[in-house]
Image (tube, helix red, strand yellow):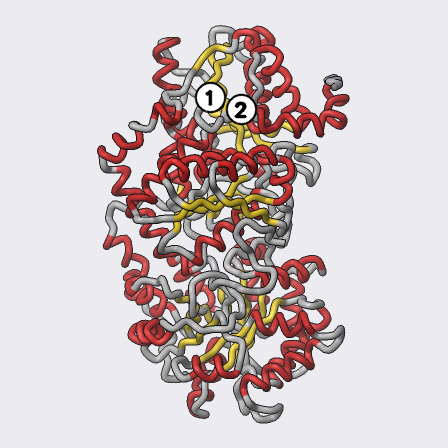
Amino acid sequence: MADHIRKTFQQCKKEKRSALVTYVTAGYPTPQETPDVLLAMEAGGADVIELGMPFTDPIADGPTIQKANTVALKHGVNTTQVLQMVRDARARGLRAPVMLMGYYNPLLSYGEEKMLQDAKEAGVNGFIIVDLPPEEAVRFRNFCSSYGLSYIPLIAPATSDARMRVLCKIADSFIYVVSRMGVTGATGTLNAALPELLARVHKYSGNVPAAVGFGVSTRDHFESVGKLSEGVVIGSQIVNVLAAAAPGEGAKKVQEYCSSITGRSPGQNGTTREVGIVEALGEAREPEGVQVDKVIKDSDVPDGPGLADQIEALNVEAASNPDALPARFGEFGGQYVPESLMDCLSELERGFNQAKNDPKFWEEYRSYYDYMGRPGHLHLAERLTEHAGGANIWLKREDLNHTGSHKINNALGQILVARRLGKTEIIAETGAGQHGVATATVCAKFGMKCTIYMGAEDVRRQALNVFRIKLLGASVVAVEAGSRTLRDAVNEALRAWVVNLSSTHYIIGSAIGPHPFPTIVRTFQSVIGNETKEQMLEKRGKLPDAVVACVGGGSNAVGMFYPFANDPSVKLLGVEAGGDGVDTARHSATLTGGTKGVLHGVRTYILQDEHGQINETHSVSAGLDYPGVGPELSSWKDSERAKFIAATDAEAFIGFRLISQLEGIIPALESAHAIYGAIELAKTMEKDQDIVICLSGRGDKDVQSVAEELPKLGPQIGWDLRF
């Protein structure tokens, strides 16, 4: 199977030409046409074929492949059907090697061993998994080898020599070289630095062929790149050809296009065939691409590295950076991202480490406390306590911070790190707008360009915060893709970051994403729990008996919980968004109703279907409307250090109403979930015990949303608020 790929490249070498590797998304434009398209690519001269496995959140792909994924998923395409497409094409005479390309989570959901068994039986030759971190790549590569299948690593322009050496050592058939930074997509020009990049690759690859992808769309491109590499990959342009074809004409048009690229007519292809290579990083320029401030509607090839090489590969960076932060919290965490982001994340980790260990950095950070509104306030909620009739309820007032939420703690810290790294531009995602406002605020303070990505639905329901962000001088990109919420904003922010890594820092707002982001966010948000601990000792002479926080991605929760993690007398309670109820499909309660998987670069609990596709979520609160959660919270769930429950939309409204009318505090809808959970917990505790709620944000941003939802939710909770 893997040997078939090697022999294909050897045959192309004998014929003194580069191999053509082509890509198409399985199920695009329809599932029925995919076997025809595979055969058409081979007939047109393709030497190796890459078949894309659709995924809901393809962060490494540009608009063309994103759309193809969306169409395929609407057709109900899943991993089982993808394998059947390969079987059907093989039964009809397809001889070219076929690689399955995709993201790790659907494969993880299917089961790695079952996937390899079924893929081999179906006639698959290997895999290109865009978002596998190095240690997982070595393990998965060896797993593939045991079944005679190939694992294809990716190398990007930003890949360091150390990482390039690692990746070349695990290649057993060919290496996919990304020609430019960004996401997939056909372009009119090629990267002028490609010769230098390929020279670096060939320095470490030995006899392993390299195939170049991203931006190749014409015969001139094919010939130019073919002079430098052993293979050339075309993907997005083939999808474009299919999109432009009349119904039923797609396969014919693809064959004609491939023939125009290779200059060979059917029957001239000898023993070689075609494949598509990983569509994973490069700046897409398709007509409906994302724009700032606009809506984003050989037998001589060794079998592979020995054990010693694999151990060396895994320890290259650890040896050079012995002070590296732990990348995982038990089984959770990691860096499941495209290769183009790996070295940037290493740079960020080194920069954060240096800052974290530098007293002068923390002196600078604390010098802005007056600006931020820190230290934060802690006080007893007397009437809320009386209402609950149990434990004392205390409020940690993050809503009184500058910008109205806890988000300023992290935004200020990260922009100081970004300045140390020499970055000049900032991007961020936002859901409810609180992180967007905080990021835009610190960018205004330090004179840095700022772009905020926000789901179009969140733009609608948080219009006030959108205006605040723009008032502060930042640009807002409304994301129309997918569910049009926080998850989609994260997708687009990650794609945008890849394009401008050298000048741009991504201030992620929650304790999610690839390492080291969860640790960075937790570090800056721990000011919440640290102050709470000090203030409770001062006011009560003891630690609280419980601390409570709402949980979306988990930034305020991890910030409140972490300082108490080693204090077993303190209960940790996280309250998620139950939406219409966790027994329905309309909720965002990841830890309560989710399963383990990989999303946005991190292994954690996520909301997914049986095929590993990410579910759409619902919450009345935009800031909790997310299908994943921070890895540290996931580890606390499994260790039972923390408990997590869900509050429905209606229950959140009860909490919202009670604290408004009993304490004169209008909370953010996110915080209202924690308030409800804390009241219910207080009822079960003694009157001399203490609960502290992290009041993460103020609710002026949510007044309109409450007014819109009251006709539905009001009758459920007996709240008739007429205007």
Quadrant assignment, res 249: bottom right
Q: Is residue 283 left or right of residue 359?
A: right
Mark 1 belongs to which amino acid?
Leu
Mark 2 belongs to which amino acid?
Arg
Disc 2 element: loop
Quadrant assignment, res 63: bottom right
The CA distance from mark 1 to mark 2 is 7 Å
Q: Which residue is mark 2?
A: 698
Residue at image location 45% in from the left, 69% down from the top: 152
Q: Position of residue 681 (x, y in %)?
A: 56, 18
Determine if residue 319 is in view.
yes
Residue at image location 60% in from the left, 74% down from the top: 238
Q: Position of residue 652 (x, y in %)?
A: 63, 25
Tell me whether circle 1 and circle 2 mark residues in contact (CB < 8 Å): yes
Q: Is residue 519 left or right of residue 590?
A: left
Rendered position, 332 above or below 311: above
Report the quarter where the C terminus lies: top right
Q: Position of residue 566 (x, y in %)?
A: 36, 26
Rendered position, 469 above or below 118: above
Q: Which mark is residue 400?
A: 1
Disc 1 element: helix
Determine if residue 148 is in view.
no
